[in-house]
Amino acid sequence: MIYEILHKEVKTSHDEFEISYYIEIRRNSVSIIYEYLGLYLYDYRKYVIMLNCVMRNEYQILESVLKNIEKIYNNFSETRKLAIITKYVIYIVSRILDIPLYKLVENVSYEANGEVTELSTNAFVKSTYRLSQRFEKLIS
């Protein structure tokens, strides 16, 4: 199922645009989707994380993500907020399923406007571990 986890509308004197983030939870994968819809530009990006296990507790994961997604979005000033949100979701999945990140993530791919790139699983997991202390501080 696909769920909207965050939606922002911004109006400036030069442009009006909407930013939406979605989560798609499947049997053995999680996708985080970013959509930018403006008057002059449309942008679509997506991370697909293949998991080594079967997803369970879908609604508990969704509830945990929705509860703190606004804090995560507002407390990170990095421009790659999609990557931060994706790592946060995988961190939550790891906590709920009680599986370490390095055993949970099988494959990571990134799609930007139709162009798919395979990413390093090791680099993704390491950066998620580096952010986990900030995530823990924000959600506690």
Image: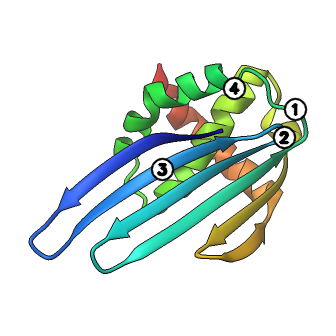
Q: Disc 2 marks which amino acid? A: Asn
Query: Residue 12 lies in what quarter of the image?
Result: bottom left
How packed mark 3 is, by other alpha carbons closer than 10 Å (few <14, some 14-19, many 20 or more), is some
Q: Residue furthest left?
A: 13
Work out whether mark 4 precedes mark 2 in sequence or the reverse, and give the earlier one: 2
Query: To which residue does mark 1 refer?
Result: 54
Residue found at x 66% / y 69%: 111
Work out whether mark 3 precedes mark 1 in sequence or the reverse, and give the earlier one: 3
Drawn side of residue 92 relative to residue 84, left or right: right
Label 4 SS: helix
Q: Observer-nearest residue: 48 or 132? A: 48
* Numbered mark located on residue 28 in the image: 2
Work out whether mark 3 precedes mark 2 in sequence or the reverse, and give the earlier one: 3
Q: Disc 4 marks which amino acid? A: Glu
Q: Is residue 17 above or below residue 116?
A: above
Q: Disc 1 marks which amino acid? A: Val
Q: Is residue 73 above or below residue 34?
A: above
Distance between the alpha carbons at the discs numbered 1 and 4: 11 Å
Label 2 SS: loop
Return the x and y of residue 80 as percentages of the image width and height: 49, 62
Work out whether mark 4 precedes mark 3 in sequence or the reverse, and give the earlier one: 3
Residue found at x 51% / y 36%: 134
Q: Are marks 4 and 3 in contact (CB under 8 Å)?
A: no
Query: To which residue does mark 3 refer?
Result: 21
Return the x and y of residue 20 as percentages of the image width and height: 42, 52
